[in-house]
Amino acid sequence: MKQVETLKKLANWKKRSGPVVFVVMDGVAYGKRKEGDAVANAVMETFAELSSTCPLVKLKAHGEAVGLPSDEDMGNSEVGHNAFGAGRIFAQGAKLVNKSLQEGSMFSGNTWQEAIKTQGVLHFIGLLSDGGVHSNIKHLEAMVKQAKIDGVKVVRIHALLDGRDVPATSALEYFEPFEALLAELNADGTFDAKIASGGGRMYITMDRYNADWPMVERGWHTHVLGEGRQFSSSVEAIKTLRAETSALDQDLPPFVIAKDGKAIGTVQDGDSVILFNYRGDRALEITSAFESGNDFPHFDRIRVPKVFYAGMMEYDGDLHVPKHYLVTPPAIDRTLAEFLCALKLKQYSISETQKFGHITYFFNGNKSGKFDENLETYVEIKGDNVPFEQRPAMKCAEITDAVLEAINSKEYDFIKINYPNGDMVGHTGSYQAAVASLEAMDLNIGRLKKAIEAVGGILVVSADHGNADEMYEFKKDGTVAMENGKPKAKTSHSLNPVPFIIFDPTYQGEYDLKLKEGLGISHVAATLINLLGYEAPSDYDTSIITLK
Ligand SMILES: O=C(O)[C@@H](CO)OP(=O)(O)O
Ligand SMILES: [Mn+2]
Ligand SMILES: [Mn+2]
């Protein structure tokens, strides 16, 4: 790989005595309505003070500004952190898969051709919604139709309920029409495609960053071994399990579709398996359960079928996982971390488990390794495996303890932090927990601010997309949607703009205090490089500050 160029020092920059600390408040944006806006309604004294005394601008963090197909698409952590770290916009997974389907390259490629050779069953595993963060049901529909055209006889779908990127209890809006489509495709008797198993995405299969392997184990038992509570159809399963548990879709227990007491879609030797999610974080663990040999320490798989396994994308471009994939991911190069390494600047990256890979792997262009072991420190604060509304602080105090030590050590030039609060608690749908979570985070940003003041560093506060700023669903007429006498919880990200604030207590007048308007979060990297005293790479999206 070609080394990046060494950036030039800014001629008129007075080097600060402390580090540049970049805070990603995950899932914190400016809502449009006060009701259900946990960000606007929480008591956040530090955020309020920074907002009224520092340079501040709103940045776009959704749609085309982060490489998604359209401005209807909300932002998410993958594309948000990619944009922060790459300083440019890359066409993202969602867009690349659309293109590959439109142009037909997916189906003419080797991976698809190999997958359809199976004499057994072609399985699809993935998230059944049009949320567009990890997957898109339209991609699955196109693949199932093509499988029939290509002469595959038996298809089994292992479908995860979303309710996290789409309304909280919307699963039947996807499962019912999808079952109808399968019935139509099966009608001529030459093709047999059925949903074979499923469950909530936060209950089985889609764990990330080694947070909770038993989730993947439950998924393996459900999809591969066909073990679990049996139902005659997915729709019956969802209705029954909802009535029994009142779980939101993302937390629905698993189900297995069976006929005469026998699971209809276990995975067997000689089958093909396609994971149709394109985003990597929540795809890597189930992929490793399929691809690992005997040295698989995470759980007893009991039976490991010999299958042709493929992912929608290459999920880790460093380690080349999975071995086979349908669409090539964006080639994100020349990231901020790489430029800082070339300058020999020391960097420190930290978050809680759920966002650890966001601030490292996604930020560094979906790269799991470091550019330079000696210059980069990664710290993960282990999260709790509990429903996050029960521990809304999301380890923000522990994260801050570690950062204060890093600041005071004077070892680091650049520190980046992800506080998971607004996002992880936002996804639970609990308004009260979201408020508590944001207030805890704000207390800790206050601690950071003091430390930065003491050492003469710069604190930059921003966010990757919205979430906690919209905790209620609204009706078309603009009033709050109600359910059982209470506001209906919204669990997904929002499309709202995010804050960008610079707290620079030893400001030397090198830049205008008025920030540039109308930009997106891909402009942050160039700004951070300037604030470290260097000229940004010429191909980066321009800095948000105007240098004097
Ligand atoms: O939890 C996740 O996987 C996504 C939502 O699907 O959230 P984020 O992009 O914030 O990680
Ligand atoms: Mn996020
Ligand atoms: Mn999220």
Image (spheres, rainbow, N blue to C red):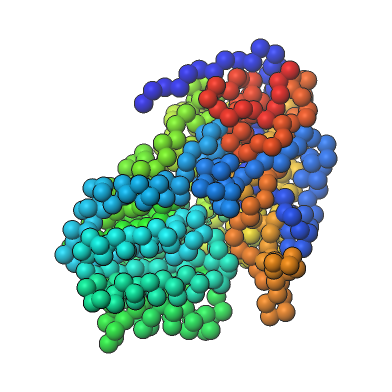
The percent position of residue 312, horizontal first and vertical second, equals 36, 52
Q: Which residue is at a point 36% across and 39% down the rendered structure image?
A: 318
Q: Is residue 511 above or below residue 300?
A: above
**Residue at the (55%, 63%) spot, across then down:** 166
Determine if residue 154 is in view. yes
Image height of 532 relative to 184, above or below: above
Which one is in front, 136 or 163? Answer: 136
Q: Is residue 155 left or right of residue 117?
A: right
Q: Position of residue 351 (x, y in %)?
A: 57, 46
Do we see residue 291 in this rendering?
Answer: no
Report which quarter residue 136 is drawn in. Answer: bottom left
* The one of 489 and 390 positioned closer to us in this rendering: 489
Going by the picture, which residue comes out furthest to the bottom?
260
Quarter location, residue 168: bottom right
Using the rendered view, name the quadrant where residue 401 is placed: top right
- Considering every residue shown, the one lying at the far front of the view is 188
Quarter of the figure that contains the N terminus: top left
Taking depth in this image into account, of 279 and 506 the one nearest to the observer is 279
Q: Where's the C terminus, which quadrant?
A: top right
Q: Residue furthest top?
A: 11
Q: Is residue 115 above or below residue 456?
A: below
Residue 69 image point, x, y percent: 51, 48
Residue 8 percent coordinates (x, y): 57, 15
Q: How many marks?
A: 0
The structure residue drawn at horizontal position 72% and vertical position 79%, both measured from the top left corner, is: 485
Closest to the observer, 54 or 444: 54
The residue sitting at 49% across, 38% down in the picture is 90
